[in-house]
Image (spheres, coloured by chain):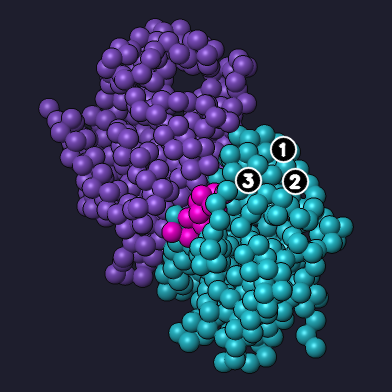
Chain colours: A cyan, B purple
Amino acid sequence: MFDLKNYIQKKSHVVNDALKLLLQNSQQDQTINKAMEYSLMAGGKRIRPVLCLAATEAVGGNPNDALTAACAMELIHTYSLIHDDLPAMDNDKLRRGKPTCHVAFDEATAVLAGDALLTMAFEILASVPFEKTDQAAKWLQIIRIIAVAAGSRGMIQGQMLDIAAEGRRLNVSELESMHTLKTGALIVASLQCGALLADADKDQLRFLKTYAGYIGLAFQVADDILNVEGNPEVMGKAVGTDRLNKKNTYPSLLGLDASKQFAQKLIRQALQALEIFDNKADPLRALATYIIERKR
Amino acid sequence: MFDLKNYIQKKSHVVNDALKLLLQNSQQDQTINKAMEYSLMAGGKRIRPVLCLAATEAVGGNPNDALTAACAMELIHTYSLIHDDLPAMDNDKLRRGKPTCHVAFDEATAVLAGDALLTMAFEILASVPFEKTDQAAKWLQIIRIIAVAAGSRGMIQGQMLDIAAEGRRLNVSELESMHTLKTGALIVASLQCGALLADADKDQLRFLKTYAGYIGLAFQVADDILNVEGNPEVMGKAVGTDRLNKKNTYPSLLGLDASKQFAQKLIRQALQALEIFDNKADPLRALATYIIERKR
């Protein structure tokens, strides 16, 4: 039996150490750096970096080669949370039991801290030392993939759709499009970059992107389900808020049971996409199941 | 006599065409793209792209090779204006006589349009086609330079200092530090990238960065002077607002005459830095003078 808890702990630890080092290399005594660190070190689950590193391992690569890409994913994810939490967007006061960035600092600082984390992601991706010149071309490819996933045709478009959906009833297909862009794009990019940095072949890349698409959506369905029947003490946040805020969720559209079945089906499809891989993909297999069985 | 007006017109035209093409390659019918286009095509002077292309020419390069870098500078400059104009920052309702992005659209869209323009800058820099693999390493260097200039040790830190200075009296050295970061860093990066893309040697790079530092500061001093004695009809905006808002400016610290002398001195120093260059640097020479003689 694969010990996923231990795997996630070890990988998160490596990612956290790398992120801390990145922050130390900036001017620590400045407010902007404090705000960046506050949100970056607020106890995120590090799902995207772990998926990135696990993809590298699945194709037989060395996860160290993908560590910078993994960190970039977390920087971009954190920036998107800071901006999504702003009063003009979701106006969230708490995240993981702690005041959001604009509450802990102020709104201007939160906007700029998000901007700085996004910019830092590209700075670190362009600063990886390499020995052979053909590796430079690969890092450009990584930057392009991440920028497209995070940009106006990806994550940002997803957030626009989310805002536009407020107070309006979406159908299942619209809900799926929104999530595919808002959270799916960056998860697919995480797997894709991890695989590319281990020189994955075309088939491996294709199947890992398929896997990523399924688990990205399953992650969101599971989040929606947790908001209905999760334990607030375990989750560190209130439940039932989606229904209260009349948010478009899978349980509200499909019902709770059908949502659970849908999540199960997505995970089966994700696992099928991994069939061409050997036991080096066991972390990815375990992560797929974890995504819908997690309690927070 | 070098015809600068014609030069700026031609270069701006090339940059505007390239920017329009970039926008067309995204999904045009989406609100996010409309907001991006609205601010990007709002009649900016294109100073940074023109400086970038002129730097390439000064060292004997082909300005086409630097066009993507020039566009990236304008994308980043525009994103910074959108975010600076937000209610939580400068709360500006008008820019160049047109409603600011958050007024024309809404605040959430403005935050995201800024995010998208910043992300797009890195996407296009990582997407330049190249023939030789050593060019890939150069584009990574360009991305790194731009990210550092725009990030938490550059432009963003300058904006933080600007916000922190509100209602507080700065001394000349603090004012200079703030401008060096807030506007200077991206102007230096514009020249540096233009020069690097033309394979400038170490001396050429050093002198162009020196030139950029002086004109960047002179640009700000000239802006402050125009806010005192400019013609509102020519400028398309009100004057006297800095004094009204008790902003830290060169005229408020040094007086008007001393500020003019300071601007003149900076331009003399900028021109001195160009002494090693032949007449291919004439556009840069003319631009230096233009920066303090412009009426808007």
Q: Which residue is mark 3?
A: A90
> Is A159 in the magenta?
yes
Q: Which quarter of the image is occupied by the N terminus of chain A?
A: bottom right
- In what element is the residue under mark 1? helix
Q: As drawn, is B92 to the left or to the right of B3? A: right
Between the C-alphas of marks 1 and 3, the distance is 13 Å
Q: Residues within 10 Å of mark 1 (few under 14, many from 20)?
A: some
- In what element is the residue under mark 2? strand
Between the C-alphas of marks 3 and 2, the distance is 11 Å
Answer yes or no: are tags 1 and 2 on the same subunit.
yes
Q: Residues within 10 Å of mark 3 (few under 14, many from 20)?
A: some
First in sequence, mark 1 or 2: give its number.
2
Q: Are marks 1 and 2 in contact (CB under 8 Å)?
A: yes
Q: Which quarter of the image is occupied by the C terminus of chain A?
A: bottom right
Give the amino acid type for the residue marked by disc 3 in the picture.
Asp
Between the C-alphas of marks 1 and 2, the distance is 8 Å
Give the amino acid type for the residue marked by disc 2 in the picture.
Leu
In the picture shown, does residue B61 fall above or below A108?
below
- The chain identifier of the residue carrying mark 2 reads A
- The chain identifier of the residue carrying mark 1 reads A
- The chain identifier of the residue carrying mark 3 reads A
Q: Quadrant of residue B153?
A: top right
Q: Quadrant of residue A248?
A: bottom right
Label ID, residue A94: 2
Q: Residue furthest right?
A: A233
Q: As drawn, is A5 to the left or to the right of A61? A: right
Percent position of residue B36, x then y? 39, 45
